[in-house]
Image: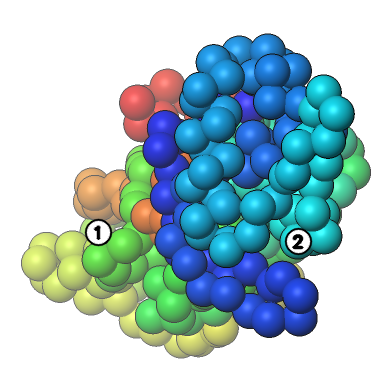
Amino acid sequence: MQPRPPNASYTFALRLDSTCINMKFDLNLLPIICTLYEERSVSRAAAKLGKSQPTISRSLKRMRETFGDPLFVKSGRGVQPTAKAAVLVASAREIMSRLQGDIFAISEFNPTVYDGKFTVATTEAAEYWLWPHAFSRLRQLSPHSTLELVRMPTSSIPVELENGSIDLALGFFAGLYGNNVMRQGILRIRPICMLRADHPFRGKKLSVKQFQSAEHIVVDAIGRNLTVDRILVQKKINRKVALIVSGYASLAPIISSSNLIVTLPRALGMRMAAATPGLKVMEPPVRIPPVIVAQYWHRKLQNEARNQWLRNTLKGIISQQHEAPERLK
């Protein structure tokens, strides 16, 4: 447990004798009154707490002044609590329990016993090529937890991070910024072209002439790489768009039965081509800068143990999954 801050003083409402008293109270007094209640002796309470008797007596005086009650009265060789002291001790124990459990709890997270839910905003492309392996590894490390992957407009992510609806966002999100949004790059992903395996175009790389003569599919989904459009315009390369789709699910059957070409993230294209015998990949005709796959979280969770574990674990899993040139240190 982290040590209680010295001279911690907080304003809180304490209910005593059916009345609510607002006060500024030194939390260091709580263990003292509880120990006095248990030991019924100033000297034994001092010994148990490792304090001097005068210190305990001064603390008791402060509490008497605060609550307007003697709290403990002399009885034989010790002291006996008043009725108000008994109520106060019950409240003090509850407060200390909550402080220890909620505020001063040790900053650790045990994924092996965690049975809650991790919620991550992601993209359709990332769900296809990134999350199968990432989920499998997360399941090994945190077998009782639930992972929920959600999709949402990029503009909604900062708000959802702030209100706690999602723990992280992970993927390529162009224009994702916010005053309290933290960002960590994980991978650089370049685009690749995917076409049917027996397409008339052969080789490892498309020529500009081939690219311009072909008809294309454009995927207009969250995480779309607009850098491709910008570079093609800069290089004055025309792309004949025959079909615009809202996601990646229909690409394999459409491309494998047509001469259409799609430009998509390399990792996604390689996985789809490997899983579908009727597809192949070729390099685009010009070099297109990579996009950064990153994870995003709210600043308030920067040092929160659960969120830290999730971020560090995902970064490690994804980095190990890809070749060194793609990884970001």
Residue placed at 31% from the left, 62% from the top?
Answer: 180
Residue bearing mark 1? 208
Residue placed at 54% from the left, 78% from the top?
Answer: 152
How would you rate the neighbour count of disc 1 (Cα within 10 Å): few for under 14, some for 14-19, many for 20 or more?
some
The quarter of the picture where the C terminus appears is: top left
Tag 1 near tag 2, CB within 8 Å:
no
Which percent across, then down, holds residue 31? 66, 36
- Position of residue 155 relative to residue 105, above or below, is below
Query: Is residue 212 visible to us here?
Result: no
270 lies left or right of 275 = left
Instruction: Give me the disc on residue 135.
Output: none
Which percent across, then down, holds residue 65? 50, 56
Query: Is residue 227 visible to us here?
Result: yes
Amino acid type at circle 1 is Val
Badge 1 or badge 2: first in the primary sequence? 2
Amino acid type at circle 2 is Lys
Element under label 1?
helix
User: Which is more toward the observer, 87 or 317?
Assistant: 87
User: Which is more toward the observer, 167 or 318?
Assistant: 167
80 lies left or right of 58 = right
Residue bearing mark 2? 84
| Numbered disc in front, either 1 or 2 | 2
247 lies left or right of 90 = left
